[in-house]
Amino acid sequence: MKHPMKHPSSAVCHSLLRGAAVLVACLALWACAAKPPTPEWQMNAHGAARKATEAYLSGDSRVAQLEWDRARAEVARTGRPDLLARVELMRCAAQVASLVVEACTGFEALRTDATPEDQAYADYLAGRLDSAGASRLPEPQRSAWSGGPASLESVADPLSRLVAAGVWVKTGRDTAPMLAVAADAASAQGWRRPLLAWLTLSAQRAEQRGEVEVGAMIRRRLAAMEQGKGR
């Protein structure tokens, strides 16, 4: 006489489920392990460029220079001038955001090997981009370029907002509301270097328009920044 098939006990079922879960977890770990790790130079270069940008915007030129040198050294390990050109573009973007009027000589020395997108971005930072090159810009800058100074508030990233504003100043298309938006972006991030530049320019423009009270208010903001200097 055949015995009816017995159903597995609750304990056995839990054991099987547990085993399946462990197997799935192991397979997931194996899949992650199969993915090549991010190269060390790439992580180091990214971290150094980020620290350099933050230090520069905060007004710490010494740390900024050390970190830019470190970023370039890490990228140089690849023997790829196109990547070195990109590091130089990042540095020049921080300068444009701070209204520093300097040629991006580091990039220009590497322009031949730079990508068309990076060449267009360099032209944009220099204030000489044409309509044909605008399509190659990163999205935040492309939107700002097509929308004009009035669209600056729609640029979410604060650094991208300041870069776009800096380009408008270079091309002589700045407006009083745009200057205020740029100053507020720098202020919210505590970026001393661009804030000083944007407030100073705003005060000068207000005084040129005969808006004495507005100019005086902006000068008070500048004075407040000086009170915290060196503390």
Image (cartoon, helix red, strand yellow):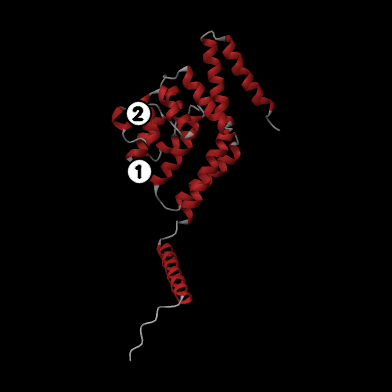
| Label 2 Cα neighbours within 10 Å, binned few <14 / some 14-19 / many ≥20 | some
Residue at the limit of the structure toward the right, as seen here: 231
Front residue of this view, candidates 7 and 27: 7
Residue 123 visible somewhere in the drawing: no
Q: Is residue 40 above or below residue 169?
A: below
Q: Is residue 20 above or below residue 212?
A: below
What's the residue type where badge 1 is placed?
A: Asp
Q: Is residue 136 left or right of residue 96?
A: left
| Distance from Cα at disc 1 to Cα at disc 2 | 19 Å
User: What x and y, as percent, mark residue 191?
Assistant: 57, 32
What's the residue type where badge 2 is placed?
A: Leu
Q: Name the secondary structure under disc 1.
A: helix
Q: On the image, numbered disc 2 is attached to which residue?
A: 129
Front residue of this view, candidates 20 and 1: 1
Q: Is residue 162 left or right of residue 4?
A: right
Front residue of this view, candidates 35 and 56: 35
